[in-house]
Amino acid sequence: MVLAVGGRVRAVHLRADTSGLTWHQGVQSRGGRILVAAAGYPAPGLAGLAGAGLVATGHPSWWLAALATLGAIQIVLWVRNLFGLATTALAVGALCSCLAFAPTTVIGVVAAATVWYLAVGGLRASLEARREHGVSDAGELGRGTRLPAGLFRFTFVVVAALSLVGCALVLFHLPK
């Protein structure tokens, strides 16, 4: 989102507890800051939902290729800590190996597993965000909109939960 609103990502640091921090600059407008703050927590679930759509329509290889490509771009442009570089490189390597050597059924299983990983992880992170106070995405949204930060923490959880339900509906072809 930083790039979409005209900013520049300086670095991304990933941590072993699955949290991370993105340093960016150049997002000057209030609306841009609001969009950046609003994008973080919903992103994993919404990405998982996009992946579920690709997997369900018979394109699990496209999904894994997209993840590998995005991971490689992250390594080259933004990830700046050793743990982040190692885990992202390992993930990209595993995805590329799967695409190159695994049978179609394994590719499908791995693709579905990545969807669930993103959807469940997004919900877990959103639930954990309820305990954040001070400098946080919800706090930034609260300051930018003059609405309670708790409203945004709740919204993050709702969006993540709906994304998880959406993934289940799409992957299991359940009636909508």
Image (cartoon, grey):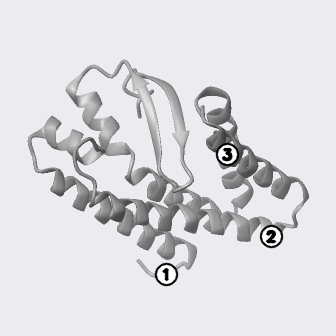
Between label 1 and label 2, give the one nearer the viewer.
2
Where does label 2 land, which residue?
A: 106
Distance from the alpha carbon under mark 1 to that under mark 2: 23 Å
Where does label 3 land, which residue?
A: 88
Distance from the alpha carbon under mark 2 to that under mark 3: 21 Å
Is 81 in front, or is 6? 81
Specify whether 154 is left or right of 46: left
At horizontal 36% and vertical 44% (from top left) the residue drawn is: 39
Q: Residues within 10 Å of mark 3 (few under 14, many from 20)?
A: many
What is the three-letter code of the residue carrying label 2?
Val
At horizontal 41% and vertical 30% (from top left) the residue drawn is: 2
Check disc 3 and report its element: helix, strand or loop.
Answer: helix
Give the image location of residue 86, x and y in percent.
71, 44
Where does label 1 land, which residue?
A: 174
Check disc 2 and report its element: helix, strand or loop.
Answer: helix
What is the three-letter code of the residue carrying label 3?
Thr
Residue 94 position (above or below residue 78): below
Of the numbered discs 2 and 3, the one sitting upstream in the chain is: 3
What is the three-letter code of the residue carrying label 1?
Leu
At horizontal 17% and vertical 50% (from top left) the residue drawn is: 149
